[in-house]
C-alpha cells in the first residue's frame, strides 16, 4: 500500500473516538480555584511537588501550578534540579514571569521573545529563550507535557493550569499541552467545553511546537499580545476532497509527517518593548566613595 493510501485510511474506531471527544464536554473529577492556601497540598497520587504554593517565590519552589494570562504573565514547566525534559517530565515545576504565587521565577535573560494569542477557544504562548538557565541541557530537543500522561495523572503529575484571559477571573484550564526544549517553548490552554480536546490534543508528542502550534511571529527580541482565530484542527487534513486524520504511529509504516497547518491569522497585536521577564537582575553594589579609601583621621 502506498504512503498516500495509508494516509487516507483512518482507523474507524480511532476516528469515532476522536469525534466523540470533540462533541461531548469532558467531565472532570475536580475543578480548582487558585489561592495561596486554598488548594490541596497535592492533587494526584505520586506527585512530587505541591499545589499549595503560598505567595513567596523561591528558586527552590516545588510549585506545580502554572498561569497563562498574557505575554508578561505566564509560566512554563522545567526540571526542579536540572535534566532533560524526557527524563523529568513527571516532576517538572513551574517557572514564571511574575512573583506572588509561590513559583520559581525565570532567571534574568532566560526569555528572549514571546508571542501570546487569545482565540475564541484557547490561549497560547510561544517563546524563544535560553532554557539552559532553568536546567534543561543544551541541545535537548525536549518533549511534550500535558494534563494526562501515561497514567492519567499528568506530566508533570498533579500539575494545574489557570488563566484569567477570558475575563472570568482565574479559572482552571483542564485541557492543555506544552512543549519545552533548550531553546523554544510553547503552551496552549483550552477553555472547558466540547472543543477542548479538539484544540488541545495530546497525541502528537514527538512533533514539537512548529508543527502543533505554528505562529506567524515568534522572533527573538519581540514581545506581543494578540487576538487570533482558532487554529485548524491539528492532524486533520483534506486530501482529494476527503477529510483524513494523520496519526503519529503512521510514520512506523513509512507515512511521512504531513506539513503543519498554516498559522492562523491574528489581529489587535500590541507590541511591547523588550522587557525583562522573571527575577530581576542582581543589583550592583553601590560604587565606593573616594572617601572610603582615605585613612581615618589621627586621634586627637
Image (cartoon, grey):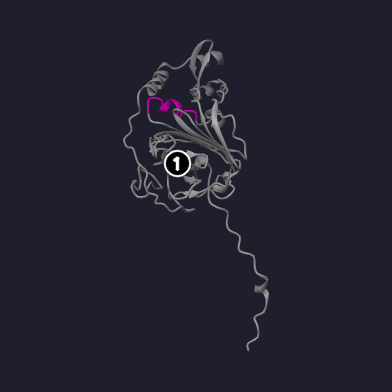
Report the residue that reaches farthest toward the top.
Answer: 241
Density class for disc 1 (Cα within 10 Å; few <14, some 14-19, many ≥20) is many
| Residue 274 picture location, percent across and down | 60, 43
Q: Main secondary structure of the magenta part?
A: loop
When asked about the image quadrant of residue 185, the answer is: top right
Q: Secondary structure at mark 1?
A: strand
What residue is rendered at 44% in x and 28% in y? 121
* Side of 41 relative to 260 (left or right): left
Magenta stretch contains residue 233 = no
Is 98 in front, or is 111? Answer: 98
What residue is rendered at 58% in x and 45% in y? 275
Rendered position, 150 above or below 80:
above
Q: What's the magenta region?
A: 193-204
Report the residue that reaches farthest toward the bottom.
Answer: 300
Rendered position, 295 above or below 214:
below
Q: How many marks?
A: 1
Q: The N terminus is located in which quarter?
A: top right
Q: The C terminus is located in which quarter?
A: bottom right
Residue matched to label 1: 67
What residue is rendered at 67% in x and 79% in y? 295
| Residue 167 picture location, percent across and down | 41, 35
Q: Is residue 81 visible?
A: yes
Magenta stretch contains residue 196 = yes
| Residue 37 picture location, percent across and down | 35, 50
Rendered position, 31 above or below 259:
below
Amino acid at each position: 500500500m502506498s504512503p498516500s493510501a495509508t494516509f487516507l485510511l483512518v482507523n474507524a474506531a480511532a476516528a469515532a473516538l476522536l469525534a466523540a471527544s470533540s462533541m461531548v464536554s469532558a467531565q472532570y473529577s475536580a475543578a480548582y480555584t487558585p489561592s495561596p492556601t486554598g488548594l490541596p497540598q497535592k492533587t494526584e497520587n505520586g506527585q512530587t511537588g505541591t499545589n499549595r504554593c503560598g505567595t513567596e517565590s523561591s528558586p527552590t519552589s516545588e510549585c506545580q501550578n502554572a498561569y497563562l494570562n498574557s505575554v508578561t504573565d505566564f509560566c512554563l514547566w522545567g526540571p526542579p534540579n536540572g535534566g532533560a525534559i524526557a527524563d523529568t517530565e513527571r516532576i517538572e515545576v513551574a517557572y514564571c514571569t511574575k512573583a506572588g504565587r509561590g513559583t520559581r521565577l525565570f532567571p534574568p535573560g532566560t526569555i528572549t521573545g514571546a508571542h501570546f494569542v487569545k482565540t475564541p477557544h484557547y490561549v497560547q504562548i510561544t517563546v524563544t529563550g535560553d532554557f539552559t538557565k532553568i536546567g534543561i541541557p543544551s541541545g535537548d530537543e525536549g518533549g511534550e507535557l500535558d494534563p494526562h500522561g501515561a497514567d492519567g495523572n499528568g506530566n508533570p503529575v498533579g500539575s494545574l493550569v489557570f488563566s484569567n484571559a477570558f475575563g472570568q477571573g482565574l479559572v482552571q484550564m483542564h485541557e492543555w499541552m506544552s512543549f519545552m526544549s533548550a531553546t523554544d517553548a510553547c503552551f496552549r490552554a483550552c477553555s472547558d467545553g466540547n472543543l477542548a480536546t479538539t484544540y488541545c490534543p495530546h497525541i502528537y508528542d514527538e512533533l514539537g511546537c512548529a508543527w502543533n502550534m505554528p505562529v506567524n511571529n515568534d522572533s527573538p527580541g519581540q514581545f506581543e499580545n494578540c487576538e487570533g482565530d482558532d487554529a485548524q484542527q491539528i492532524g486533520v487534513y483534506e486530501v482529494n476532497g476527503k477529510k483524513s486524520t494523520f496519526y503519529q504511529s503512521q510514520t512506523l509504516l513509512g507515512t511521512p509527517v504531513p506539513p503543519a497547518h498554516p498559522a492562523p491569522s491574528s489581529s489587535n497585536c500590541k507590541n511591547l518593548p523588550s522587557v525583562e521577564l522573571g527575577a530581576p537582575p542582581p543589583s550592583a553594589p553601590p560604587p565606593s566613595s573616594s572617601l572610603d579609601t582615605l585613612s581615618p583621621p589621627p586621634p586627637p
